[in-house]
Amino acid sequence: MKIQLSEQEKANRKLDPETLAIAVEQVKANGYILFDKVLSEEKISNIRNNFDPLFDEFIERKGYNTGTNRAQMFLPFMEPFIDEDVICHPIVTQVIDEILGEWNHCNYFASDTPMPGSDYQNAHSDIMPLFPELAIPLPPFSLVVNIPLVDVTEENGPLEVWPGGTHQNPDRSNHDTLNNTVNPHLHIVRAAEHMYSEKVYMSAGSIVIRDIRMWHRGTPNRSNDRRTNLAMIFNRSWYGAGSSISIPQETYDKLPEKAKELYRMEKIGSPVKMPWE
């Protein structure tokens, strides 16, 4: 579902109570919500101009790592990537606080870029189940936030998602399907072929919040340009496996108070880590 913010919500950088309730309901019941055109064109252009040469150097050094002509790249915790509108936009934190509760935190700061010539990924979930012995759905405990740096169209490889309950599937659907293995509990690649899915088209500077367990896949980029999403992962206070962010002390000290709260559990005092390090 796509939400167009009102002029008042944009100006106040705060969702009306009704909009907040709808957004929370959609993430819990449908798996994701999309806010259209939240960040300004100027801000997105500046971030993209700094991202592209960094990504080019990363590919030259490390190559593609998430499929044909497709790469995940961790971002250095530095300007302009750590703009407040990226790392702790008030509208995003409003929704996340409502779903994940107080003292949630971010432990993943990266990007996903399908280049021209990229292919389909297998349908997959981004996470293993917390309690694989339990055949029951659990409440949300981890949310992904994506911000596209370009308009996302049919041609440049939009994210495809399976809404309406795949994030609540208890049958151990996980990321191992990316490498063509078959999940012994549920053949989700085959199952996804016969289920409803939708592609997430959006303008540059939009914001997507989705349950990390939701089935999804990257689609082919048939355009002549890269299609980059910034990506962050926010977790309940007690969860946060798999990644960490290096943040210099002086950088942390200058962060807004909400950002200090969100990134409090990361490697504070460590030098900025470049993507190829």
Image: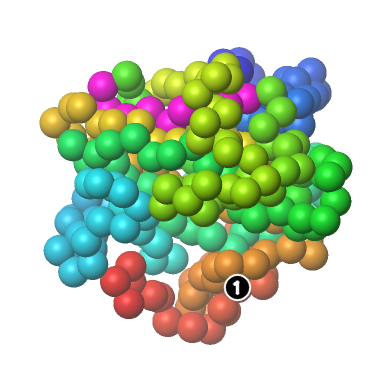
Please tell me whether residue 205 is drawn above or below residue 243 in the rendered image.
above
- Residue 223 sits above or below residue 57 on the image: above
Report helix, strand or loop for mark 1: loop
Circle 1 residue: 266
The picture places residue 192, in percent across and down from the top left corner, at: 54, 28
User: In the picture, which quadrant includes the N terminus?
Assistant: top right
Answer whether residue 253 is magenta in the image. Answer: no
Query: In the image shown, does 256 or 17 lie closer to the viewer?
Result: 17
The quarter of the picture where the C terminus appears is bottom left
Q: Residue 202 vs residue 56: left or right?
A: right
Tell me what residue is drawn at x 44 percent, y 65 percent.
77
Q: Which residues are magenta?
A: 155-163
Q: Of residues 87 and 137, which is closer to you in this image?
A: 137
Task: Count the marks.
Answer: 1
Kind of residue indicated by mark 1: Glu
Q: Is residue 112 left or right of residue 46?
A: right
Magenta region, mostly helix, strand or loop? loop
The reply to whether residue 62 is visible in this rendering is yes
